Amino acid sequence: MKTDRHLRFLAVLLAPLVSFVVELTPAQETPQSLVAEVDGIIRDSAGKPVMGVSVLLSKEDASPTETTTDAAGAFSFYAVAAGTYRVTAKKSGFRDAIEDSIKLSPAEKKHCQFVLQSSGGSSSFPAAGIELDDRPNFTVAGITDSTGSGGHGSETRMRTGETLAKDTLNLESTKSEEAPAPVPKDRAGPETREAEKALQAALLKNPQSFATNHELGAFYFHAQRCRDAIPLLEAAYKLEPGDHGNDIDLVLALRACGEHSKARGQVSQMLANEKALGKRDEADLRRTLGDLDENTGDPLGAAREYERAARLDSSEQNYFAWGAELLLHRAAAPATEVFGRGVRLHPDSARMLAGLGAALYTSGSAAEAAQRLCEAAGLEPANRAPYLFLGRIQEAASGPLPCAEQELARFAQDQPENALANYYYALALWKRNRGSQNSDALPHVEALLQKASTINPKLDAAYVQLGNLHFARGAFQEAVAAYQKAITTNPTSSEAHYRLGLAFKRIGEKAKALSEFEQFKQLDQTEAATIERQRRELRQFLFVLKDRPDPLPPSVSR
């Protein structure tokens, strides 16, 4: 990875600049040692290879090259000049799969994986009324430490997919029945303090009472005082080990204090001791076990507990937890299957659609992902999450995405004081009109970016995009000023230093350009090392799709 980055940096210094998205222009005769390769595998949503797919490799300033997949779903392009490309996969009966912004360095080999979704009907998924087979079409066979490399076509896609996977875990359901928010101790009013004193007095009077131990323990837990709560709830458990409410409070208090192993043991005891558990109660405990397994470093155990919970009770919460766990550990195809089934079961769940969008994007289907996120935004227009997911995907894409501009326009209209709403809408407009010199659209893009930076002066990405807009117009001094603002806001922005170097080069400030390129190189290496370490720390699922005897390996660049 480091070698590739060094080569890319060297190539940038030598290459002419031709557009807003700076690409390397191939020489008329490319030495064999400098050409790159692109290959890949295309599967359907069941994981089976798709033969006869038309695959186009295209570049803005050149005619596309075309090939077709063989019986194994494989395709290859050889002797490709360095630059930025798009791969498009087309086959009758399937929706197009598009991989944007594939950046090829000299002598690099890039491996892509695509999942083609059926084009039947208005949705890739059957209607909610169809009876579902609850058996998954995959088996999680094991885990492995991540290689830290690879992805579906580009580093940009991989990083965006990783961000979406982490953010998916934090999506909340607006329909879930959550407990009221606890009141911290420092915000407790006189009535709360009086209630605490009364409970303490009752406990002193009768320390062996289950009720007094439980009530004071629950009081402390809901006041976010888990350390005070645990001894009391444990005492109540010893007095009446079969009380489900106290057991749950004890598990939650242990978890809140980070005592995940003890909490897991408590849940296991509850499953063993409570003979009259209904399916829903058992499913809730299984889901809690899954949470605790993930907390204690056992993602394989977590995935299996989430699956058990979903089989016991096909609630929105259980299916979402299962899909999010698979996605987090890079099992994108199984995550797509689980989220897809979750959408069929719970068609009114915006976060399920958002999770499906994140999984589809990670699988290589950016256009299909955008459609799902637009549907999620339509279900809950006041919910920011689907718009933010859609904006991140649009930011990573080299061109406009289906429905993105319309939904991001609504986001900016409904939340005019949201900096990201203005920023992402500006990106959608810019990517549709880039190169057209549309006199109406480009001032609007600039105004939106200016507004975003005014609302949030720390949003360095808005300054970078303003610089890019000026650069594309040939206003290089204005571009320099915008990039310098971005660096003042965020000195560690490698992209801002890189773009500033390009702008300095255009105005003849070669020494300053070299200085910025050197800073870019150092920051880029540091950022890459951090991301590489995080990827290696992530434990990745190995999974087997039905009708396949071998576990699918992690997606890697070969």
Image (cartoon, grey):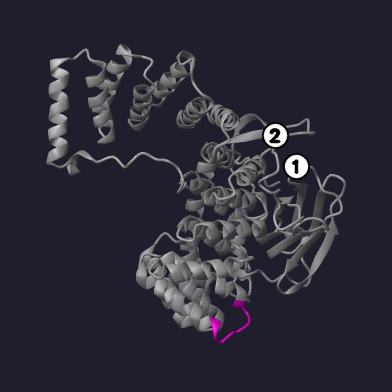
Determine which residue is flagged by label 2. 138
Q: Where is residue 398 in the image (x, y as percent from the top left)?
A: 62, 66
| Rendered position, 263 above or below 168 | above
Residue 437 magenta-highlighted: yes
Q: In which quarter of the image is residue 546?
A: top right
Amino acid beneath label 1: Gly
Instruction: Please give the label number shown on residue 549.
Output: none
Please tell me whether mark 1 sits on a helix, a strand or a loop.
loop
Marks 2 and 1, how far apart at CA: 9 Å
Image position of 34 (left or right of 265)? right
Up-down relation of residue 86 to residue 471 (above or below): above
Is residue 105 visible to us here? Answer: no
**In front: 173, or 145?**
173
Q: Position of residue 354 (x, y in %)?
A: 55, 52
Is mark 2 in CB contact (under 8 Å) with mark 1? Answer: yes
**Residue 534 at least partly seen:** yes
Tell me which amino acid carries mark 2: Phe
- The residue sitting at 17% across, 15% down in the picture is 206
Residue 75 percent location from the top left of the image: 81, 52
| Residue at position x 58%, y 40% in the image | 323
What residue is at 77 percent from the left and 66 percent from the top? 30
Q: Which circle marks residue 47 in the picture?
A: 1
Mark 1 crowdedness (10 Å alpha carbons): few <14, some 14-19, many ≥20: many
Mark 2 or mark 1: whose residue is earlier in sequence: 1
Q: Given the current orientation, which residue lies at the most extreme front position?
A: 129
Q: Where is residue 122 in the image (x, y as percent from the top left)?
A: 71, 58
- Residue 212 horizontal side relative to residue 358, left or right: left
Out of 250 and 527, give the one closest to the viewer: 250
The stretch in magenta equals 433-441
